[in-house]
Image (cartoon, coloured by chain):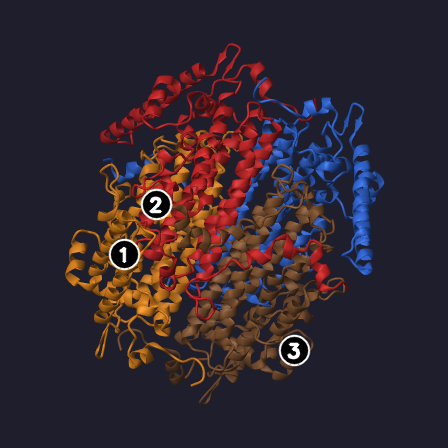
Chain colours: A blue, B red, C brown, D orange
Amino acid sequence: MSNTKDKYSTVHYYNYLQLDKLLDAQHTRSGTTAEEAAHEETLFIIIHQVYELWFKQIAHELRSVIDMFDRDNVDEKNIGTAVSRLQRVIEIQKVLIGQIRVLETMTPLDFLDFRNYLFPASGFQSFQFRIVEVMLGLQEKKRLNYNNHRYASVFPEAQQKQLEELQNHGSLFAAVESWLERTPFLQFGNFDFLKHYRRAVEAMLNKEQEAIKASDYLDEEEKVMRLRMLGSTDTYFESVLDPKVHEELCKEGKMRLSYRATVAALLINLYRDEPILHGPYQMLVSLIDIDELFTTWRYRHAQMVLRMLGRKIGTGGSSGHDYLRETALKHQIYTDLHNISTLLIPRSELPELPVELKKELGFYFSHR
Amino acid sequence: MSNTKDKYSTVHYYNYLQLDKLLDAQHTRSGTTAEEAAHEETLFIIIHQVYELWFKQIAHELRSVIDMFDRDNVDEKNIGTAVSRLQRVIEIQKVLIGQIRVLETMTPLDFLDFRNYLFPASGFQSFQFRIVEVMLGLQEKKRLNYNNHRYASVFPEAQQKQLEELQNHGSLFAAVESWLERTPFLQFGNFDFLKHYRRAVEAMLNKEQEAIKASDYLDEEEKVMRLRMLGSTDTYFESVLDPKVHEELCKEGKMRLSYRATVAALLINLYRDEPILHGPYQMLVSLIDIDELFTTWRYRHAQMVLRMLGRKIGTGGSSGHDYLRETALKHQIYTDLHNISTLLIPRSELPELPVELKKELGFYFSHR
Amino acid sequence: MSNTKDKYSTVHYYNYLQLDKLLDAQHTRSGTTAEEAAHEETLFIIIHQVYELWFKQIAHELRSVIDMFDRDNVDEKNIGTAVSRLQRVIEIQKVLIGQIRVLETMTPLDFLDFRNYLFPASGFQSFQFRIVEVMLGLQEKKRLNYNNHRYASVFPEAQQKQLEELQNHGSLFAAVESWLERTPFLQFGNFDFLKHYRRAVEAMLNKEQEAIKASDYLDEEEKVMRLRMLGSTDTYFESVLDPKVHEELCKEGKMRLSYRATVAALLINLYRDEPILHGPYQMLVSLIDIDELFTTWRYRHAQMVLRMLGRKIGTGGSSGHDYLRETALKHQIYTDLHNISTLLIPRSELPELPVELKKELGFYFSHR
Amino acid sequence: MSNTKDKYSTVHYYNYLQLDKLLDAQHTRSGTTAEEAAHEETLFIIIHQVYELWFKQIAHELRSVIDMFDRDNVDEKNIGTAVSRLQRVIEIQKVLIGQIRVLETMTPLDFLDFRNYLFPASGFQSFQFRIVEVMLGLQEKKRLNYNNHRYASVFPEAQQKQLEELQNHGSLFAAVESWLERTPFLQFGNFDFLKHYRRAVEAMLNKEQEAIKASDYLDEEEKVMRLRMLGSTDTYFESVLDPKVHEELCKEGKMRLSYRATVAALLINLYRDEPILHGPYQMLVSLIDIDELFTTWRYRHAQMVLRMLGRKIGTGGSSGHDYLRETALKHQIYTDLHNISTLLIPRSELPELPVELKKELGFYFSHR
């Protein structure tokens, strides 16, 4: 058999994965030998490195999906591919959340054995995580303010610039928004989607009101309360039925997705059983999933910090738990897609589509 | 506020879920009071009840998918719905596997506290699980023989009949097979899919042979071995290129899916990026996932039994662990779909489709 | 072989699990046949039934643990058993959280197909979940107010009484608290734990202050901010060093665990490596885990409701998402145990225990 | 604020994690730019790097546990720590298994886009995984033979030597075995554990025989079969009751754990409720868990390979799926601990311990 040297001249697991670099990148600061160093510092380093590797992978997927959608003419072949890649991001996110359990096997007391050596480094300094957030569409103005410092100020200037450019051009949010705006089905011949939808909504709300008023079960107080809540839903419908209401909400920072894109997303949700809309529907659901999983991740992260530090301040100077917990919801990006649920009406109330439109939306795999 | 009686005359969580029945169905046999009974028997009952509830749900989903496909003319709208429902089965299976961990919190010694009271009851007597297996397409002749008893003999006659009928008519396997057979794209005008595919396979195998022969890294012994393995792959390609080889393999019980359905499944796998084939591709992947997850479930189940009983015999008289472990692979149903992977060739070698066919396969969501 | 009738006269899987009741308890309201009924209503019923079964199991475990601890003289043999049972609760909770994914395969539109039939039933009406909350130690005064209704008012009187009694006597919180209060190690001969601890804390805080002041990295503004945060940690230490501060915090509703129990929990956390304290430490960690997992469960539940309903009101009349999200943190019970982390100091600063005490705390398994 | 250069002169997230190395270690071979390279190759590299990082962490934990046990006088304080670290390994293993789902989002066709570039690299070349296996106690003679090559031959000589030395001295298996052999409780004054155990076993087997013979439910054929199975369990008991039978089984390669260690493990399992045995019991359960999870990992790995390649040969020249599946069970290490379950008898049949021994085994936390 060939000698050792030869073995590494061709591609070998070891050099393919660059294990020389990878496995030599864990230098504990609490001590340089295994005996000296705090036992758990290795875990602390390695789990964060694993996070960074996964962030790189997520950025790789998001970049490719943005490139597919950030153009005037999205190739339909790509929707399936885009959905698969977003599904991959979702599976990675599940791993990111799941592995918090590994870190939680380190106890608060274990952590104190090396915590002082980390000062003032902090997870706030993960450039890749910021990249992922900005790629997804998080805007600086929406970020939770942290001690009056710009979030990007912890990075070198070149990186600050990179984040800024990414935010201004080509987030996934922007790409999806303009793709939605180009949906060709909102007005089809004589069929005006919004007009039919408005009628259906009114019918549905009337029914619900009647049910509440007629209920033997609810006492007066509860009836009043429920009718009031129904009223507030009502207002929300206006945001899609009336472009001016929508504009107002955008100005107030309560909505972000453009009017036309919102209506398109609604149509896709309502008629997602039509074959041609199935891919786009999966696309929207994937974005909601990703958003939800990052929310969960931030939340679990906050819990873990609480567990590790209690009310102590983080090495980066943050109040840790509280900050992270607040970002969980505040840094959600696709809120407008989540809220589409508010606008849905039962299939039984759904306006029937004209035959020609249904034909356009369908396609036939067998028996032609 | 209304009095108690009224409260339950309208729909209430309690009667909607029939909690009177549900929560009164846990009668321990090791004792009738909490003090007397073995503490862990309650867990044993409840987790099995949870399994049965989920089996019912899985059967509900499979029934609906079979009904969609078990007809000459599958409505394309249904493929998306069918995939979603199979995805739901997949999510349920993940729960079934995950919750084995709960049962494993019961130790072998805990189990011995009430095990004798169960004799001769056994998980072999779960009718619903048999229903699910048969619905998916497991055939009696493929079942691992267990002590020369027919698997169904533990059930009353009426149930035995039900299983038999289900096996003969209308499993998901049969429904999917006939749906695949009707794929209209195998021959399209002058384009003969198999002819092009054969050429591409030959080109690919040649390349691989050359790579092995030319390798500086492999010694002679290894080259011979690899070329031999390549040869065996080669034979496998024949099963799809030559209908007679396929027929022979079916007779020997090594394949089950019909020739035409196999070729269709191959085409769908190779050209799954074409929009119209994306749904069918997701359908096939879902079936593979379900199969794989039941395999994992059986395997984990076997591990758990080993842990609980060691080499002791089960209350149902089975040798437990060994039997279950063997069924893990033997009771796999969609093996032929798994094996499609063997037949795949790189996209770069894929025969180019004629323009008209591509048009048929595509559809256009935006910018028409 | 024996006939069918015989088969069921002895114990059989079918009657052991009472499958006649269990599998006949799914009556859809949107229609009585599979064709008529909304397809997803079955899932909705079954997943909630599964939740109820698991709640019953959790209550079974908690009841047994409370019985072990709710006495003057806790048998040490029981600590191991108690921890195992709490671990089982934890594994069940992971299943509860995981299976939300199954419900999320139902889309908002699917839900609308049968949602109206549920009115006015609601998850607020799960008696067993309330039992679990109260058993763990949730107090009514701590509950998030919901529309000015008492949370228990949805239940019949007998059940309201049951909840009240359970709250007043014998929650797990109370049992654990009094067990902690009896820890014999707080004062041992001449060794006064708190005195030594106070000195160690002061030393540690001084070091941290010096590090901040001496840092080249932080600018003045940041230094001020960090020193301020350190100051607030300082105050927190007072809550354990000064009984009066603790009393004040209890009055304000900011702490709940008694002074003596808090100090005991701190001691257990700091010296958990001593063999005799290992079981008690695992006990405390399990309680924190259970708390954290219910928090996560409520949070995921809130997310799921948002996804399903958007801003619509729930069938029970709740604003759904917002309410649930707020309870996630507010209904946390063992906050004082979580906060012990704040009070921890590095092992290197830990007061050395006197030899006799160490001996008491240890035990010797081998080589005596 | 300080300038960029300063920012990195103190410890920063970026240099602490050595992200320069870590994030520059993904060089695709199918192309050097994102456009050229196969999209999924990045995932393939990154997930394997993540595996390697976790393997390093597992080795770190195992090393520390071996060091604690590989000495004549195990410090009891360490058992709790050892168990926590093995629990950490378990949590990592769950992540390793869970993340296979991420790799499965890559389809077989995606893989073919770059598979040829990997030849002849292979997962067989993971040195760290071999280290972990050998640390746990896997012996070369027990390894599944692969094409007549020694498993270590793919590594440079220095590494081969390292594996050999590790195998000969100081695996966790050996350390645990000698620790078990030193258990002081097997003979205690006049109490001879084995003598009492033998009587209890005989009583139990008699009862089981009677139950089978007296059963109205079983037909003759089944009775014979069950009695035969009971007989084979019987033989298994001999392996612990009779040192010669044990010796014989060891010679045949059917057992590995020494006689004295086996008896000690049995005693710990039977009397694990005694406080002093609780830690040792958790230790044994953790080893079983780790073994079981690696078995599951290999199994899932095998499934994934089947899915990706079907019956194609791997880039390393292996028949992939079959090999991996067989190792799943064959490379199990703590089989003798799994089999302890066979030897357990119900608590009700357990010989009562003498009072003095019980006292030795207990310890008192409160109320002394």
Numbered badge on residue C250: 3
Identify the disc placed on residue D213: 1
Q: Nearer the viewer, mark 3 or mark 2?
A: 2
Question: Real-space Cα distance between discs 1 and 3?
Answer: 66 Å
The answer as to whether the residues below labels 1 and 2 share one chain is no
Q: Disc 3 on helix, strand or loop?
A: helix
Q: Label 3 sits on what residue type?
A: Cys
Position of the C terminus of chain D, as image quadrant, is bottom left
Q: Are marks 1 and 3 on the same chain?
A: no
The residue nearer to you, when weighing D244 against B188, is D244
Q: Residues within 10 Å of mark 1 (few under 14, many from 20)?
A: some
Answer left or right for A187 relative to B80. Answer: right
User: Which of pointers 1 and 3 indicates the residue nearer the eye?
Assistant: 1
Pinpoint residue D73: horizontal percent, then vertical percent.
28, 71
Q: Do the residues labelled 1 and 2 touch (CB within 8 Å)?
A: no
| SS category of the residue bearing label 2 | helix
Which circle marks residue B325 in the picture? 2
Q: Do the residues labelled 1 and 3 touch (CB within 8 Å)?
A: no
